[in-house]
Image (cartoon, rainbow, N blue to C red):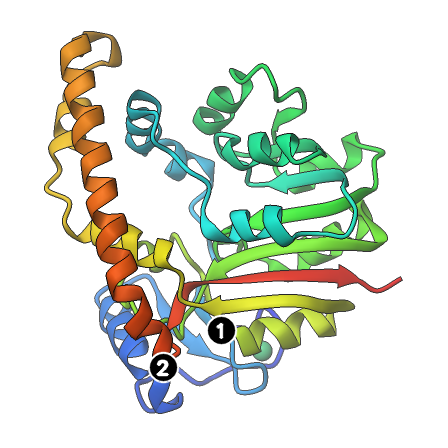
Amino acid sequence: MPNCPLCETYTTKETSQNSLPLSSNLFLSKLIKSVDKMPDYSLLLCDKCHLIFTDPMKGPGSEFYESDFLPYKIGRILDNQQIRWPQRIFLNTGTPGKGDLLDVGCNTGLFLTEALKSGYNVTGIDFDHNAISIAKQNPLLKEIYLSTLDNFIPKTNIKYDIVTLFDVLEHLDDVKVIFKQLKTILKPGGYLVLSIPNRDRGIDIFNELDLPPHHLTHWNAKVLTSFLVNKGFNIINIDNIIKYDDLALYISNKTSIGLVKNKIGNNKTDNLSTNTIKMLKILSKLKNILSFLLGRLLYLPLLIFKTQSPTIYVLAQLKK
Ligand SMILES: [Zn+2]
């Protein structure tokens, strides 16, 4: 059995439905059932820091993500992609000053484009060459690199004011190494911005993307807070309360009949007629509007019950 990837405690305890408080049991039982069916993986719960992690801690590498090109293709054709709520919250309430911002796992550069408009000097890296090639087509984004953080650090002499990792941490097979690296490129007093799936979420309990080899670690606000404080950060803002975006996205995913996916997936981009693209754009807009309205309706009751979001957002500051 391996040591905990966060606190290095030797862990022998397989995660079971009885091993966490009742509030986590619905998520856990679904997760445990799914991982039980995967012969190569098991789940462990750290006794000390309460991180849930996968054994073995082995990510699939960039080829795995690059093989799934369809989401980018759909996004580009429909031109309907939007930044997610943690990114919006950061841009609206973010850091006291602007400055140099590095987005690790920048994907197609959607967030970087908005950050640039808000006044940040932006740089983005990602190891997925499909995503990077789309980001590079944006003439506004000058500093975009196909790279891991590991390979990027020796090539830059900039100390960044802000480093953002949106939905990255849960994919990594060595979280501690990444934090060592982050400290070498963040200015003292610099900011770290994170979003990460929330294992204490009240909706979208089961999401197959939350399984290994996609996601290797499972966090909640408490585990994340103690880890960051332990690594020398002050928590400025942590938010895990449900947002109406969560509901809209959930409704939209759950009501998917795969129409757009089939049309675009079966055709090369150039083969789709202008009319087909127009129709797909209208249908997808309509669906987004309906999901948004339904999401707004369901939002208030869930908010009253203090339902947690599927995502945790954190703004933390490296101690000087
Ligand atoms: Zn631990």
Q: Position of residue 70 (x, y in %)?
A: 28, 30
Q: Is residue 67 left or right of residue 316?
A: left
- CA–CA distance in space, label 2 to label 1: 10 Å
**Residue 26 place in picture, x, y as percent:** 27, 79
Under circle 1, the secondary element is loop
Q: Which residue is mark 1?
A: 220
Residue corresponding to mark 2: 24
Which residue is rendered at x = 45% and y = 47% of the image? 84
Residue 190 position (above or below residue 142): below
Q: Residue at x 79, y 45 (%)?
A: 185
Amino acid type of the residue that numbered disc 1 sits on in the rendered structure: Asn
- Determine whether the beta carbon of the residue marked 2 sits less than 8 angstroms from the nearest atom of ligand 1: no
Amino acid type, label 2: Ser
Ligand 1 lies in quarter: bottom right
For residue 294, which quarter of the picture?
bottom left
Q: Position of residue 248 (x, y in %)?
A: 28, 52
Q: Quadrant of residue 303?
A: bottom left
Q: Quadrant of the image for the C terminus?
A: bottom right
Q: Are marks 2 and 1 in contact (CB under 8 Å)?
A: yes
Left or right of 304, for residue 88: right
Against 177, is 75 above or below?
above
